[in-house]
Amino acid sequence: MLQARQVSIGASSARRSATSVASSSLHALPGRHLSHGLASSSLTASQRVSGQAACPVLRRTVVPHATPEKPGLSPSSTPAQQQGDNGQLLFSIGIAALWIGLLGYAFFLAPNQTPYRDQIFIERILGIGQKDGYVVDPVFVGLFNIMGIYPAIYASLLVPAGRSENKVPAWPFVTLSFFLGAFALLPYMALWRPYSNPDANPLPPPSSELTGWNRLFLRGAETPIMPALLLAGGVYYIGMAVTAGGPAWAEYFKLFDESRLVHVTTVDFATLTALAPFWMENDAVGRKWEQRGTLLPVLSFLPVIGPAIYLLLRPKAEAPK
């Protein structure tokens, strides 16, 4: 019996010695234990919690370092997005300032020495009123008719490529532009917002958008026929002005200094010509026109004719079945 007790005491001492040796070995290799804990990415949440509770070193190591957020920035906001928003805001402010400036100039600063003659100009160009044999200056006649072509060009560029993400419709402004020119289009340009997701406004437009009588103009703009007619009209009226001769141009510059109609029409023409390259580029990018980098810069320098040629060459939508 005494021998059995001695054997039991010896076994207990051996177990305590083995436990002590294992504990010493564990504390001697904390790095190995830590790397093993960090590498076990497949552990469940309960296993990681229990492991942290068992080892204070591991618990301090795996706690993620919280990065403080910058004030004023939402988690989804990026510097590129903020820069785009700021650029769009500056664009809108610039267009609005241009519109207000043109209105003020037309009503308060433009010459208005011949208001009665301005009325006669409109009557003779439109073919109404008395037939007294008075002939309007051919340079201004060409310019006046070109201002009827430009709204059709802008309608082809703004619908659908110039659709606004904020759902402001373009057609009321485009319709008024046939009577008011840039004075009607500039408010829409100031309100316009480009689509952040280009797939939301596919170009060329799908054939489903070309059906119905109310889409007749859009359907015509997506064919070579209407751009060809606009190009022919632009070439004709520009040719009329260019070949009018020196006396006709001298008369035009005289009218520019005296007539509000001639003066404001010229300013309107210059404004639409200056803004056309932006909307041509916007449309060409959306349609992924392969010749955008080579032909578009050249066409941008040709008033009326350049945008009409672009409308003729750009990728077209498929005809509705």
Image (spheres, helix red, strand yellow):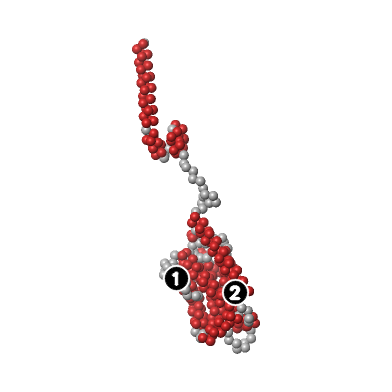
Q: Residues within 10 Å of mark 1 (few under 14, many from 20)?
A: some
Image coordinates for residue 67, horizontal then vertical, percent = 49, 45
Image coordinates for residue 305, horizontal then vertical, percent = 48, 76
Q: Secondary structure at mark 2?
A: helix
Q: Secondary structure at mark 1?
A: helix
Q: Which of the 4 image quarters holds residue 180?
A: bottom right
The answer to whether any part of residue 251 appears in the image is yes
Front-most of residues 116 and 312: 116
Task: Please report the residue visible at 53 percent of the width from the left and 74 percent of the height from the top.
Answer: 270
Task: Please report the residue visible at 58 percent of the width from the left and 82 percent of the height from the top.
Answer: 255
* Mark sitting earlier along the chain (1/2): 2
Image coordinates for residue 34, horizontal then vertical, percent = 40, 36
List the residue tagged with mark 1.
297
Image coordinates for residue 56, horizontal then vertical, percent = 45, 33
Q: Is residue 137 above or below residue 86?
A: below
Amino acid on which disc 1 is placed: Pro
Camera-nearest label, 1 or 2? 1
Task: Please report the residue visible at 51 percent of the width from the left and 80 percent of the height from the top.
Answer: 237
Front-most of residues 167 and 282: 282
**Given contact means CB atoms under 8 Å apart, are the residues at marks 1 and 2 in contact?**
no
List the residue tagged with mark 2.
179
Q: Which of the 4 image quarters holds residue 19?
A: top left
Q: Is residue 292 left or right of residue 116?
A: left
The answer to whether any part of residue 122 appears in the image is no
Front-most of residues 315 and 32: 32
Q: Which of the 4 image quarters holds residue 124?
A: bottom right
Front-most of residues 253 and 234: 253
Q: Residues within 10 Å of mark 2 (few under 14, many from 20)?
A: few
Disc on res. 11: none
Amino acid on which disc 2 is placed: Phe
Q: Is residue 64 left or right of residue 151?
A: left
Residue situated furthest top in the rendering: 1
